[in-house]
Amino acid sequence: KKQRYEYKQYLKLQKETPSGQRTPYTQRSSMTPARIKNLNRIGFVWNSQQAKWEQMFRELVDYKNHYGDCNVPAKYAANRPLGFWVTRQRVQRREMGSHPSGMILKRVKMLDSIGFMWEAPTRDTPKDSWNPVSKMEHEMIR
């Protein structure tokens, strides 16, 4: 956490401070270009929220490869965090533009590219909008 904080401070100071000008001590960062280079070399993750989102996306792709769709149940017993994450993506998409949301266009496109359904299927959802597997088979394999 400290490295990420220092990195953000460093970037902020780079934008605000003309080169060569000293900044008040309270605004300084201990981050240096050499430290950034070393952290990059060992694969340091600068944006942990983005990394977590990408990890969950990969888990969704694995789910789709196994089940043939992205309709993870909200209370998916095998991976509860994935079920919750899928539900959050739908909520964040609805909130996009009207409320602060973690959903950005790049993420929408990534989810669209794997056939993500923005509306959760219900028991009344027409069968032809599901994967060719019947509804009953679909629920049995989960």
Image: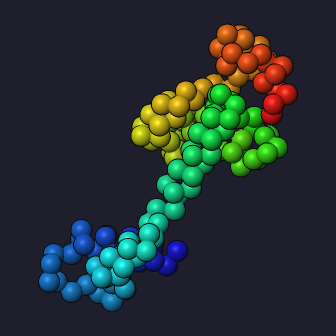
Relative horizontal placement of residue 94, taking residue 122 as reference (left or right): left
Which residue lies at the image location 78% right of the left edge and 24% below the top edge?
138
Residue drawn at x 71%, y 10% as measured from the top left: 126
Q: Nearer the viewer, residue 101 or 65?
A: 65
**How is this picture coloured?**
rainbow
Residue 98: tell me if it is visible: no
The C terminus lies in quadrant: top right
Q: Is 54 situated above or below 119? A: below
Residue 126 or residue 133, whichever sits in front:
133
Compared to residue 24, the image places residue 43 above or below, namely above
Q: How many marks?
A: 0
Give the residue at x 79% y 18%: 135
Q: Decide if residue 106 is in sight here.
A: yes
Q: Nearer the viewer, residue 43 or 116?
A: 43
* Image location (x, y in percent) of residue 127: 72, 11
Direction from residue 36 to residue 50 in the image, left or right: right
Left or right of 66: which side holds 4?
A: left
Residue 101 pos. (x, y %):
52, 44
Q: Residue furthest bottom?
A: 25
- Percent across and percent down for residue 48 are 52, 62
In the picture shown, does residue 41 fall above or below 132? below
Q: Quadrant of residue 13?
A: bottom left
Please name whichever residue, 97 or 60, is drawn nearer the observer in this view of the structure: 60
The x, y position of residue 103, in whole percent, is: 50, 42
- Residue located 85% across and 28% down the image: 140
